[in-house]
Image (cartoon, coloured by chain):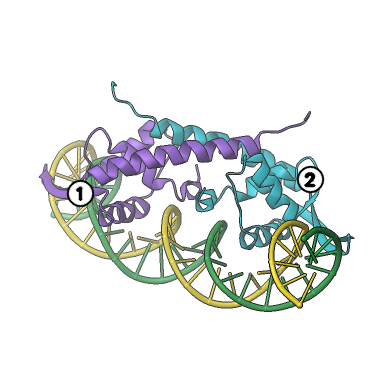
Chain colours: A cyan, B purple, C green, D yellow
DNA sequence: TGCCTACATATAGAGAGCCTACATGTAGAC
DNA sequence: GTCTACATGTAGGCTCTCTATATGTAGGCA
């Protein structure tokens, strides 16, 4: 799937996978892949900058950890992030409803 | 609604409103507004360049007409455009399914 | 007569955000 | 010793949408 279509919805996806538990970047990519049934393969060059952007605006916080000799930066939703997620869900609902409506064929009007 | 979220889906919408009948740019904008129940207000600076782009790649053809002293450029789907529309619908179905799945809360897993 | 709104098309410049490609390094399997 | 999986990050480019502006006609109204 062309993730270019995700433009503008990436934030929602990232916030959503972080809702239940904190994760590091690599794990987030895997979570997106699993939850999409393998359809979504988001490149690292998209995820890492996006996570930093979300942290910059206050929706995420991060801390470094070392697990098995590897350094991980684990991201966690802030209160603001949870609010943003709720907003994104609502926006997605509206948006997808409108697009679906317009895309639905109306052969016999 | 923020039409920036439409990035990547605008083509699908334009092709879809042109499916049943040829329309000119201004009428396309009104059609999008009506079909969305007033939620979508796409600026002219988005629609006109997009139509030209779709014509350039062969999904649309256009011809000038004068109606009531005003010049209109009426766009019509080509065969390639119909095929593209089918592809866009399928892509939207996949895309929205994946996003909805990931955004759906999973409180009790 | 002059102004305003609706109709109608178009371009320039800016900005956002996603992409590809590359850089760097560890751990463990073979 | 080499390869794959794990793990993070930056640089530069590209596409598409946005805002703002320009141009012009038709018709209503004062």
Q: Which residue is mark 2?
A: A79
Would you say the residues marked 1 and 2 are in contact, meaning their CB atoms lie under 8 Å apart?
A: no
Label 1 marks a residue whose chain is B
Q: Which residue is mark 1?
A: B61
Picture residue at 38% right of the left edge, 49% below the top:
B43
Q: Nearer the viewer, residue B98 or A81?
A: B98
| Residue depth check, mark 1 versus mark 2: number of the one nearer the observer | 1
Label 2 marks a residue whose chain is A
- Residue B79 visible at all: yes
Tag 2, which secondary structure?
A: helix
Q: Nearer the viewer, residue B10 or B45?
A: B10
- Residue A91 visible at all: no
Q: In x, y percent, where is residue B1?
A: 50, 41
Q: Quadrant of residue C29?
A: bottom right
Q: Nearer the viewer, residue D5 or A63?
A: D5
Crowd rating for badge 2 (residues with CA inside 10 Å; few <14, some 14–19, many 20+): few
Q: In x, y percent, where is residue B69?
A: 10, 46
Q: Quadrant of the C terminus of chain A?
A: top left
Q: In x, y percent, where is residue B77?
A: 24, 42
**Callouts 1 and 2 on one subunit:** no
Tag 1, which secondary structure?
A: strand
Q: In x, y percent, where is residue A98?
A: 46, 34
Q: Quadrant of residue A89?
A: top right
């Amino acid at each position: 799937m062309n993730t270019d279509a995700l433009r503008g919805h990436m934030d929602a996806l990232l916030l959503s996978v972080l809702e239940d538990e904190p994760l590091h970047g690599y794990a987030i990519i895997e979570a997106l892949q699993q939850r999409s049934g393998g359809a979504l393969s988001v490149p690292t060059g998209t995820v890492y900058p996006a996570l930093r952007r979300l942290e910059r605006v206050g929706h995420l916080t991060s801390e470094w950890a070392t697990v098995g000799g590897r350094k991980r930066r684990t991201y966690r939703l802030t209160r603001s992030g949870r609010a943003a997620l709720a907003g994104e869900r609502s926006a997605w609902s509206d948006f997808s409803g409108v697009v679906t409506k317009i895309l639905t064929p109306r052969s016999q009007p």
